[in-house]
Amino acid sequence: MSLLEVDSIDAYYGESHILRDLSLTVEEGEICALLGRNGAGKTTTLRSISGAKPPTVEEGTVQFKGDDITGMHADDVAMQGISLVPEERRVFANLTVAENLEIADVSRNASNTWRRRLTSTGQSMSTDQVYDDFPRLRERKTQIAGTLSGGEQQMLAIARALKQSTDLLLLDEPYEGLAPQIVDDVESAIERINDQGVTILLVEQNAAAAINIADRAYVVDQGATVFRGSADELRADEQTREQYLGV
Amino acid sequence: MSDEPATAAETGEETPADVPGVFTLYGNELKTLIATAIVLALFPFVFARMPVVSDVLQGYQSLTTLILIWGIFALGFDLLLGYTGLLSFGHAAFWGSAAYGAGVFSQHVTGSPVLMVVAGTLVAVLLAWVLGFLSLRRGGIYFAILTLAFAQMLFYMASSPLAFITDGENGFTGVETAELFGMIPLEEDLPSILGELLGTTLYAFVAVLTLLCIALAYRILQSPYGMVFRAIRENEQRAKFVGLNVWRYKLMSFVLSGLFAGIAGSLFTIHGSYVPLSSLYWTESGEVVIMTVLGGTGSLFGPIIGAGLYLYVENIVSGFDTVGPFWHLILGLVFVITIWTFPRGIWGFFQDVRDYITGGDDQ
C-alpha cells in the first residue's frame, strides 16, 4: 500500500474543469516531485489532497494510509498527518516566530472537541529540536514572522509543518522568489527532514532544482499526468522535458 | 511568550502541557492591572470633582459609570472585531437582551445587583451561542448582515409580540434594584475619602467589574486562544491547514464577546433603572463598532477610551451652547480624522508616541 494514492480525480473550480482523471501515488519515505508549467494543475492537485476549498473533487478518490480522505475538511486532513505549506505567504505574518511554531502545538494539544481526531503517526518534533534544525529561527524567535526574509519564512513554514506530526509534507513552490543561495539552503532542509522519515510531495516550476532532490517525478499538463517515472528517467527523457517543462 | 513549554511529543505520549493555575500571572499582568486599578480609582475624581480640570471638562459622576459600562461592551466587541477579525453588526442583541434579562429578573426574582448581572449575562451568552451558531455559517459581509438581521428580529420581538414582558415602545420600567449585598445602597456616595475619589457605590461596583473584565480579556489574549484568534484574523485557511477547528474558535470568540456585552448590558439596566427599547436597536450595534474602531481595534484599552470619547461628545459637547447642536457632526469629524491620521485608533496613536519617545517596542 502506498502512503498516498490519488486515483483518477476530476476537480473543478466552479464550472471550470481543472484536473482530468489525474492519478498519482506517493510511496512512504520518498521525495516525489510534481512538475509542470504554470496553470497545469499542480497547485489544484495539492489543494485537492489537503482538503482546501475550492476546488471540489467530483470524481475519483484520494486515499491516505488506506483511508479515504476525499472531500474531508482541511483541518481534518491536517490531523491525519498531512501538512501543506502553501505557496507565497506561508506563515502567520502577524505572529512571532515562536508563536508560529506554538500554534501547531495548540492544535495537537487541544482537547478532542477542539480539534479534529489526531490519527497521524508521524513524529512531532519538540520546539527545541526544530530550533536545533533551524538555528536561525531560534535567533529570531521573538521577531514578527512577517519581517523575516523570504528564505527564513520558508524555513519557518517547513518547521511548523514538522511540529504538526507530519507523515506527508506537501510543499507548494518552496523555491519561488528565493535567491539561488537560499534555494540551496531550503533544498538541504528538505533533504534533512526527508532523512528523518517525512515523506515529501514537492510541487515546483523550477524543474531542474526539483529533480535534483526527487526520487520520482510526475509531469502534469492540462490537468492530466503525462509522465511518471524516476528522476533519472525524467533526466533522460529529453522530449518530455522540452515539451512540458521547457528545460 | 519566549519560554516554550517542552512538548510531550518527544516521548510520543500526549500529556497535557504545563497548565498554569488561575493565580499564575502572565507577562505584565500584575503591572497592567494595578495601573488600571489606579486609573479607575482616580477617574471619577478627576472627571467630576477635581477643581479646574472637572470645570473645564464639565464632567459629572454618572457619566463616568456609563463610560465604563460601554467600555466593557466595546472591550468584548474588540475580541471579535480586533482580534478574530469578525465584524458583527448585531451586538445590540446581546447588550439589549442582557438589559431586559437583568430588568425582568429584578422584578420577578431578586433585585440583588450581583445576581442581576449574572442573570443578564447568562441570557446574552446563551443567545450569543445560538446566533453565533447560525451567523458564523457565512463569512465577511454576509456574516455582518446575518447578525444585523437577527438583532433586528429581536428588536421587533421586544417591540410588539413580547410587549407583555418588555412593555414595548415604552421600555421596561419595572426595574427594582436592591441594595448591594443586601445592605449598601448603590446610588449613595461612599464614605469619606472613598466618596471623594470614587463617588457612588454604583461606580465602585462597575469599576470592580470593569477591572475583572480587563483581567479576563488579558488572560484570554495571552492564552493560546488569543494566538489562535489572531491567526484566524490573518488567514483562516492557513489556520485550518495547521489542523485548527477554525469554526469552533470563531464561535468561542463570538460567545466571549457576547459575555462581555451581557455584563455591560446588565450594568446598563442597573445604572439607568430602566431598559429603553432602543437598547436592541441597530444604532446601538453601530455605536459599539464606532467606539471600538475610534479607540483602536486589536488593543485592550483602546475600545474603552473610544467609548469614553464617544460618550463625552454625545453627553457633554452636545450641551455646549455654541457647537452643541452639531455634536453628531463633531463626532463624525473626530472619527474621520482619527481614522485618517491614525488607522490604529487613539490607542495606536498613544503607542506611536510612546515608541517615538522611548524607541522601545515593549508593551
Image (spheres, helix red, strand yellow):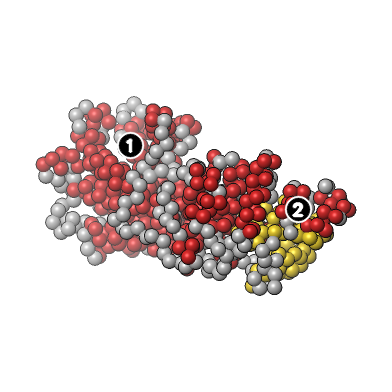
Residue at figure coordinates x 49%, y 57% from the top left: A126
- Disc number placed over residue B312 in the picture, else none: 1
- Disc number placed over residue B245 in the picture, else none: none
| Residue B86 location (% of width, % of height) | 49, 51
| Residue A199 location (% of width, % of height) | 65, 61
Query: Residue A137, can we see it?
Result: yes
- Determine whether the residue tagged by mark 1 lies in a helix, strand or loop: helix
Mark whose residue sits in front, 1 or 2: 2
Residue A184: image quadrant is: top right
Q: B352 left or right of A149?
A: left
Q: Nearer the viewer, residue A99 or B165?
A: A99
Amino acid type, mark 1: Tyr
Binning the other alpha carbons within 10 Å of mark 2 as few (below 14), some (14 to 19) or many (20 upward) gives many
Vertical arrangement, residue A147 with respect to residue A10, above or below: above
Q: A72 left or right of A32?
A: left
| Residue A147 location (% of width, % of height) | 54, 39
Amino acid type, mark 2: Ile
Residue at figure coordinates x 11%, y 44% from the top left: B191
Query: Residue A113, can we see it?
Result: no
Residue A26: image quadrant is: bottom right
| Chain at tag 1 | B
| Chain at tag 2 | A
Residue at figure coordinates x 56%, y 51% from the top left: A133
| Residue A139 location (% of width, % of height) | 50, 43
Q: Nearer the viewer, residue A32 or A110?
A: A32
Q: A236 left or right of A94?
A: right
Residue with the mark numbered 2: A211
Vertical arrangement, residue B203 with respect to residue A113, above or below: above
Measured in 3D between alpha carbons, the distance from the residue under mark 1 to the one under mark 2, in whole angstroms, is 67 Å
Residue B23: image quadrant is: bottom left
